Image (cartoon, rainbow, N blue to C red):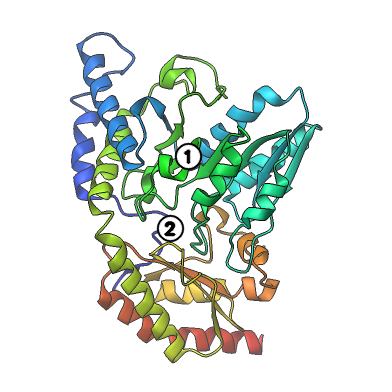
Amino acid sequence: MQQIYLDHNATTPIRPEVVEAMLPYFAGTFGNPSSVHWAGRQAKQALETARDLVAELIGAKSSEMLFTSGGTESNNLALHGVLRPRKATPFRIVTTPIEHSSVLETVKALGTDVASVEVVTLAVNGQGRVSPSALEAALTPDTALVSIGLANHEIGTLQPIQELSPMIRERAIPFHVDAVQAAGKIPVDVNRLGVDILSLSAHKIYGPKGIGALYVRQGTPLSAVFRGGPQEREKRPGTENVAAAVGFGCAAQLCAQDIESTPPRLIHLIARLWDGIQQHIPDVVRHTPTQACLPNTLNVGFAGASGEGLMMGLDLAGVAVSTGSACAAGSVEPSHVLLAVGCDKAGAKSAIRFSVGRDTTEEDIETVIRILPCIVERVRKAGRSG
């Protein structure tokens, strides 16, 4: 059976060049980068070269990059690291209802654990976009942090970060942006965006799992969440995963080289997929905006069909898609993102997300267009009879 992978927002296949770059650091170059002898120095040099490459992907300085275990840790470190010193005094956090769970759950925990925390969740429009005027109205003197994702993981909406950042920065409020889904798919430059803290993850850009990074603009206060060592400028103690960091650096370098040429091809594939769905399947709704969105993402609702049923039907046919974030897989609740943009529960539960990647072919898309109508009809029929 042919296998077609259309779930690149969940994770991407690691590139062969990345695997090759990592291999020496599993055996021959095995030193601890904190050791001062020759073995440690070799590992340290590799770690810092990787840091340089990840920094270059987002236009940052190497000294502003911290390695973490992934996007979830980066988001947690950003929020706790900025807010922990403020726990003694009342403060406000501003975010949106469509953030990744690693942001929303952390904000929720902070709001529960600290009585003096006020969480302001900005409404989004039907395309999942924040209103600049609503944000400005939410920025009070006691606002301690704003956290807004650059690209939504489920529907692909891009937030107008460059428009939002000046009003945040002029009030000297730290601005955290989750760029895990954006980096490698669109150009990301921390200086153009005007952000203070930014989260990244390697496995979203054809690198290894278990390694991420946090950009922290020079001068932005950030406290350590863990204790135990001087690694990562005393912000994230523990022996660094050198092999994974090297893989991250290699993946970042390759993505930087492809960042101009790849998006147009992905846009073409998504456009063809949407055209085919519209042409052959009735009663569908596109949740992904047609403008200002990720080039590789298409979230579609199929009225009268279960998203879980569609996903399983496609899986049996060899096609991998998702009903939303991989971190929420198995949840019986409808997508919080789709509810926030105005879907009712039934509509939210009828959606699936297609996310294409650098290895996706036009033949893959044509195959999905050919097999999907029968799967949709079968799932809809099962729902009616049930």
Quarter holding residue 304: bottom right
Residue 86 picture location, percent across and down: 70, 25
**Front position in the image: 187 or 155:** 187
Residue 108 picture location, percent across and down: 71, 43
Residue 31 picture location, percent across and down: 26, 19
In the image, taking residue 126 as reference, residue 191 lies left or right, namely: left
Q: Earlier in the sequence, mark 1 or mark 2?
A: 2
Numbered mark located on residue 198 in the image: 1
Mark 2 lies on residue: 9
Q: CA distance from mark 1 to mark 2?
A: 18 Å
Q: Tell me the SS state at disc 1.
A: strand
**Front position in the image: 372 or 255:** 255
Characterize the local packing of mark 2: few (<14), some (14-19) or many (20 or more) Cα atoms within 10 angstroms.
Answer: many
In the image, taking residue 172 as reference, residue 314 lies left or right, namely: left
The image quadrant where one finds the N terminus is bottom left
Q: Amino acid at mark 2?
A: Asn
**How many numbered marks have been drawn onto this rendered protein structure?**
2
Identified at 45% across, 39% down, the residue is 70
Q: Tell me the SS state at disc 2.
A: loop
Residue 385 picture location, percent across and down: 65, 89
In the image, taking residue 115 as reference, residue 301 lies left or right, namely: left
Q: Amino acid at mark 1?
A: Leu
> Pointer 1 and pointer 2: residues touching (CB < 8 Å)?
no
Numbered mark located on residue 274 in the image: none
Residue 30 in view of the camera:
no
Identified at 52% across, 41% down, the residue is 72
